[in-house]
Image (spheres, rainbow, N blue to C red):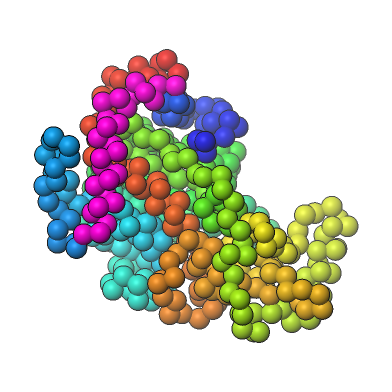
Amino acid sequence: MLALTQEESSKSFQTGSGASHALIRCMDNSQEDLTKDHCSVASSVNQLYYESNQMPSERKTRLTSIRDNTVAFPVLKFIDLFAGIGGIRLALEKNGAECVFSSEWNKFACQTYEKNFGEAPAGDIREISSKQVPDHDLLTAGFPCQPFSISGVSKKGSLGKPHGFDDPTQGTLFFEVKRIIRDKRPRAFLLENVKNLLHHDSGQTFDVILRALEDELDYDVHFAVIDAKGLVPQHRERIYIVGFREPRAFEFPVISDSKPQLKNILDPKPPEKYGLTPHLWSYLRAYAEKHKKLGHGFGFGLADLDGTTRTLSARYYKDGSEILIPRGKGRTPRRLTPRECARLMGFPESFEIPVSDTQAYKQFGNSVVVPVVSLITKRIIECLHQKPISRAKQLSLIATA
Ligand SMILES: C[S@@+](CC[C@H](N)C(=O)[O-])C[C@H]1O[C@@H](n2cnc3c(N)ncnc32)[C@H](O)[C@@H]1O
């Protein structure tokens, strides 16, 4: 299941940015043709990576015999921009890659990052020159999504504030990513954002981004919207944009359609402080009732313990209303604990949470679902170990799409 829906695919054509997406689509049909030189190597590469995860780091760069060939696989180096608490880094390190630089300016996110990775990220990316950024194979960036998210746009709109690229503090950060790609020319990049980035400003925002990456920077770009709910019990759709300096036979992973259940990640005895006060619970019910009468869908989300939750957002610390856990008759529902939020985002139990609950909710709500990023980055790494496909071949694939 390629997560680019038909509607989104045709939208990308409407906005004049269809070339590489034609490539994605035609790969559905031409997959065999495209990858037949590579697929036997690919399965060995997978195996190598599983093995390399078991190795001490000093042994990761080495000559490894694959079948009859001797192939050198140096450890892939990446940079972690807008690092947050390092969700993308966790996924890449799991796949054997090495982080050589990170940037994050929020002091609480930096505390969590340092506690878990043993190093503090550099600060404001706008003040870091490209010369200060080490050479790397893969650039990753979950650049701030608030200027593009539906709730961010409507809040800024109602306050008469600019959004998207016009938001002077957060909206222009994509251009910092572009600057570093332009100056450092990494072999690949992975960008992550909210799904609404596709639709913001009637598709024009996404069009600007694609034109910058494809036409100005000359990268081979693929994108997909992926819902994490097959891997964690949370409905969370995010857009992932992957680019290669030399075109690659890249495909987004197929996410399992198994249905993880919320009840399996809940603490059996969460502290009482996570229960809603009767006052807040009646307020939330009254608010939902009022909006129902007005025909709006706003309101709290009482979670289905056998199903998936709504999307965890950075606003969860406010009242937790988007994901409330029922506690049975006669009791108010409760909010998730920070540790349960970590699980909802696919973080390992060993991940440490050194900050207040408020900061932890913000940090997990802003982060990525680690297993989704792990599957995508595994594919990117495999592609980087395969031969590039020639431009001529890529163009002929587009022509026949
Ligand atoms: C959507 S979050 C990314 C979260 C990250 N992917 C993770 O796994 O936690 C965007 C991050 O960019 C950071 N940020 C915003 N502006 C920044 C800037 N100018 N320089 C560095 N970091 C910035 C925010 O503090 C926030 O943590």
Whether residue 97 can be seen here: no
Q: Please give the range of residues in magenta.
A: 29-55
From this viewpoint, which residue is outermost toward the front? 67
Is residue 271 in view from this perspective?
yes
In the picture, which quadrant includes the C terminus? Answer: top left
56 to the left or right of 312: left
Instruction: Give how far across and how far down residue 327 sits, in percent.
Output: 73, 74
> In the figure, is residue 305 to the left or right of 243?
right
Task: Please give the name of the residue rendered at 47% of the width and 40% of the height, measured from the top-left corner.
Answer: 254
> In the rendered image of this protein, does residue 182 appear above or below residue 112?
above
Q: Is 362 displayed left or right of 23 in the figure?
A: right
Observer-nearest of 12 and 114: 114
Residue 216 coordinates in the image, percent (x, y): 34, 35
Residue at the farthest bottom position: 272
**How many numbered marks, from 0 up?**
0
- Measured as percent of width and height from the top left, residue 391 is found at 28, 24
Front residue of 309 and 120: 309
* Residue 240 falls in image quadrant: top left
- Residue 42 belongs to magenta span: yes
**Magenta residues, dominant SS class:** helix
- Where is residue 124 drawn, in percent x and y? 35, 65
Query: Which residue is at 69% across, 79% downward?
Result: 275
Of residue 293 and residue 99, the one placed in the foreground of this image is 99
Q: Is residue 153 magenta?
A: no
Rendered-image quarter of ligand 1: bottom left
Residue in view at x 40 percent, y 48 percent = 375
